Amino acid sequence: MTDRNTSLMARIDADLDWLVAFQRDLHAHPEVGYEEHRTAAKVAESLTQLGLSVSTGLLGTDVTTVLEGAGDGPTLALRVDMDAFPIEEAEGLPWRSLNPGVSHACGHDAHTTIGVGVARALANDREHLRGRVKFIFQPAEERPRVDDEGEKPYLEGVRATSAAELLVRAGILDSPPVDEVYGLHLWPWLDAGQVGIEEGPAMAGAANFTVSVFGQGSHGAAPHTGVDSIVAVAHILTLMQTIVSRQTSPGEPLVITVGTIRGGDRRNVVADRVDITGTVRSNSAELIRETVPRQLHAVLDGVCRALGARYELDYYPLILPVMNDVTLARAAREAVGAVLGEHSVVASLDRAMTSEDFACYSSRVPGLYLKVGCTQPGEAVIPLHNRAFRFDEEALRVGTKAMALTLAARLTAGQ
Ligand SMILES: [Zn+2]
Ligand SMILES: [Zn+2]
């Protein structure tokens, strides 16, 4: 370990009590998306104390700062999310949420804390840094605005407008232009002390759809005089699953879930309309944006033609997959492994089918999304978004160290 890394790690170790207190305070005062006023003020205060100048207010509760190194080099962005989740926290923690119905069930209090921790560590290390780090404390990761009109989609056909997307449109990746973007999430499926650094897919892309199938009503005793939309939908639901099992590669995970189905009025009337809604998840942008909608149309068209029904499909991608840049992933594994030990780095994890608006940044500039293990070794996994979610505070230490090492290595390359 170089002297420089030794002092960086020592600084974070010495900071741990402060970081834990900061995180517990955020945890006790969770705020949902676009309402993170207290959280943003705490973050801004902590950055100002480091002598950094802070920008706020693009979306109301975002906080941004640029930490300049001593020499010239690339501009890296570190994005962390700050918002809480609308769920009542389980009993138990002394620093349990004081806000009824809201809690940090997704661990964003830890992400915010790690972001501040990295800023504190790197502010102390400026003389070694060639380039700069732009810290983006983002609101409302859990709260995309799904609008049917108004907002311009960020990609053809993409309708949801996430906070990340709004920040990108407001120029968060410009002036100075960001060369690489970094993010992280607590990951209960890894032990505290471990960091997942994958190449390629890190989070899934998502799309939603609504299908309306139109038949023709008739007496239930004379179905041949009408067109039964319920029978059509029965075939559609079954065939839809063959998009996963027979139309796409088993090597590429894909989920198609129908979550609602509504139709029919009376037991003895052939239903003239059924509506279904569902969601699609995949790590492949091509599957999300091209293959699945094309095959959905094929299924709907085939069934409806055979049965004399008619359909309307409204299919809209919400978010792209997060794809980790291979070069950045390898550099991070080397930087983290060399200091925290090879055992602390996990290169391959089960594919996550959850989504993240970090994709709005990483689909524009090369990105890397770390997964920070947070379950105490030997303890049962409590998943994210569970009201009993809690984490081993060792994750704050290791997450801060891993991210500080990753960024520092990129800002000293070639020295
Ligand atoms: Zn979440
Ligand atoms: Zn989250």
Image (tube, rainbow, N blue to C red):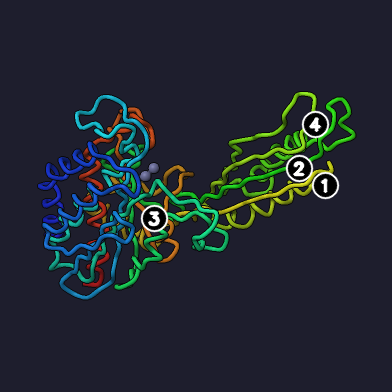
The residue that disc 3 covers is 163
Whether pointer 4 and pointer 2 mark residues with C-beta atoms closer than 8 Å, the reply is: no
Q: Residue 262, position in %: x, y?
A: 66, 34
Q: From mark 4 to mark 2, how far is it between C-alphas?
A: 11 Å
Mark toward the start of the polypeptide (1 vs 2):
2
Reading the chain from its start, which is encountered first: label 1 or label 3? 3
Q: What is the number of the mark on residue 270?
A: 4
16 is higher (above) or lower (below) than 268: below
The quarter of the picture showing ligand 1: top left
Locate residue 77, reporting x and y percent.
Answer: 30, 62
Whole-angstrom CA distance, mark 2 to mark 3, is 37 Å
Q: CA distance from mark 1 to mark 3?
A: 42 Å
Q: Tell me the amino acid under the disc marked 1.
A: Arg
Q: How many marks?
A: 4
Identify the amino acid type marked 3.
Ala
Please tell me which of labels 4 and 3 falls first in the chain.
Answer: 3
User: Which label was assigned to residue 214?
Assistant: 2
Marks 4 and 3 sit apart, C-alpha to C-alpha, by 45 Å
Give the mark nearer the N terminus: 4 vs 1.
4
- Residue 305: numbered disc: 1
> Residue at the location (19% across, 55% down)?
44
**Circle 1 or circle 3, nearest the eye:** 3
Residue 1 in sight in this render: no
Instruction: Residue at 34%, 71% (x, y): give it.
Output: 174
Q: Residue at x 36, y 49 (%)?
A: 140
Of the numbered discs 4 and 2, the one sitting upstream in the chain is 2
